[in-house]
Image (cartoon, rainbow, N blue to C red):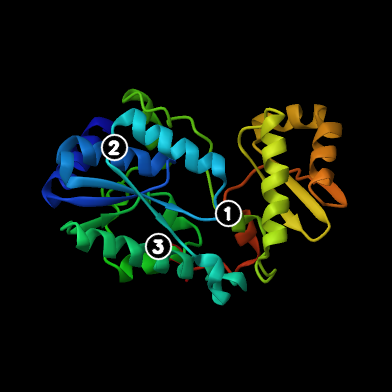
C-alpha cells in the first residue's frame, strides 16, 4: 500500500514536467522535494522562505538537508511581520503569510519558466484549521502528498525507508503559532519565545512548544517526554523565566499540534475552517 502511494506520488510529479517546491526542511516538504528532484532533475527547484518567524537553527538545518540530498535550492526573504493584518494575529493570520509566500514563489517560478508550485500539505492537515490552504488554492498550488492520500505517519515511514534525515524530525511551526489569537505579535514577544525554546532544546527536549500567555510561559511536551520534563522542572522554569516570563507551567495534556485552535468553533466534518 505504501509503495503504491509512493509510486503514485512519483508519477504525479513526473507528469508535471517542472516544479517549484515550497521547501522548509520539515518532514513533508523534504519528501516532496526529494521525490520531485528524483523524477524531474534540474526541472525541480526547492525554494526556502526565510524570515524572523523562523529560527536561525531551522533555516540552517533546511540548508544542510538540501545540500546533503542534492536539491537545487533558492532562498527568498518574506516580510509577513510588516503586514499589520498578520500582526493582529486573528484566526486567519496564516492566510496573509501564505498569500505573500505563494505570490513570491509564483514570481520565482514564472521567471525561471517553471509551471507548477508545490507544497507539503498532507492528508492529515485538512482536519485542522488551515487558512493557508485558501491561499494555496488561490495561487493554484499543487499538494501532491494530499492528492495521493499520504498521512503523516506514512510520510515518516517512507522517509525512513528512503533514508531521509528528516524522517524522525520533530514537527515545526512558525514562532507566531505560540501566541493566542488576538494577542498582537511583537518583536519582543517573538524574541522571548526564540530565547526560551533555544534553551529548552539545549536541555534535551525534542518535540515541544512554549505557548505565550502574557506573563505565563506554558510548556507543551510530547507525552513520551513529560516525565523527563518534570524531572528537569527546575532547569525548565529557569529557562522560561530567563527569557522574560514571570511564571512557568507545564501543560498536563502535553504537546498537541494546533492547540491554540481549541478556542475556535468546530467546523462541519470534512470542511476546512477559513
Query: Does residue 158 appear anywhere in the picture?
Result: no
Q: Is residue 204 left or right of residue 120?
A: right
- Residue 41 in which image quadrant: top left
Q: Is residue 67 left or right of residue 114?
A: right
Vertical position of residue 22 compared to residue 233: above or below:
below
Query: Which residue in the protein does label 3 denote?
Result: 101
Q: Residue at x 64, y 58 (%)?
A: 260
Vertical position of residue 267 compared to residue 46: above or below:
below
3 and 2 marks in contact (CB < 8 Å)? no
Query: Which residue in the protein does label 1 denote?
Result: 258
Q: Residue at x 43, y 64 (%)?
A: 98
20 and 28: which is toward the camera = 20
Figure disc tally: 3
| Residue 183 x/y as whole percent | 70, 68
50 and 122: which is toward the camera = 50
2 and 1 marks in contact (CB < 8 Å)? no
Numbered badge on residue 71: 2
* SS of the residue under disc 3: helix
Q: Is residue 261 left or right of residue 77?
A: right
Q: Is residue 150 left or right of residue 41?
A: right
Amino acid at each position: 500500500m505504501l509503495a503504491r502511494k509512493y509510486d503514485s506520488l512519483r508519477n504525479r510529479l513526473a507528469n508535471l514536467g517542472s516544479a517549484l517546491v515550497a521547501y522548509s526542511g520539515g518532514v513533508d516538504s523534504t519528501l516532496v522535494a526529494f521525490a520531485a528532484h528524483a523524477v524531474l532533475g534540474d526541472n525541480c527547484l526547492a525554494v526556502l522562505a526565510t524570515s524572523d518567524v523562523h529560527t536561525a537553527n531551522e533555516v540552517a538545518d533546511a540548508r544542510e538537508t538540501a545540500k546533503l540530498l542534492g536539491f537545487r535550492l533558492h532562498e527568498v526573504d518574506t516580510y509577513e511581520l510588516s503586514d499589520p493584518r498578520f500582526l493582529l494575529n486573528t484566526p486567519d493570520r496564516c492566510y496573509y503569510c501564505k498569500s505573500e509566500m505563494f505570490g513570491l514563489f509564483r514570481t520565482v517560478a514564472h521567471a525561471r519558466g517553471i509551471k507548477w508550485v508545490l507544497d507539503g500539505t498532507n492528508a492529515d492537515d485538512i482536519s485542522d484549521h488551515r487558512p493557508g490552504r485558501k491561499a494555496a488554492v488561490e495561487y493554484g498550488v499543487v499538494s501532491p502528498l494530499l492528492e495521493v492520500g499520504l498521512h503523516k505517519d506514512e510520510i515518516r515511514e517512507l522517509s525512513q525507508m528512503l533514508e531521509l534525515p528528516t524522517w524522525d524530525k520533530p514537527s515545526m511551526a512558525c514562532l507566531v503559532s505560540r501566541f493566542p489569537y488576538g494577542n498582537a505579535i511583537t518583536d519582543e514577544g517573538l524574541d522571548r519565545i526564540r530565547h526560551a525554546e533555544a534553551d529548552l532544546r539545549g536541555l534535551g527536549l525534542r518535540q515541544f512548544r512554549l505557548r505565550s500567555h502574557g506573563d505565563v510561559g506554558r510548556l507543551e511536551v510530547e507525552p513520551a517526554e513529560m516525565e523527563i520534563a518534570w524531572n528537569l522542572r527546575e532547569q525548565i522554569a529557569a529557562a522560561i523565566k530567563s527569557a522574560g516570563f514571570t511564571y512557568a507551567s507545564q501543560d498536563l495534556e502535553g504537546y498537541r499540534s494546533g492547540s491554540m485552535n481549541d478556542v475556535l468553533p468546530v467546523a462541519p466534518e470534512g470542511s476546512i475552517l477559513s
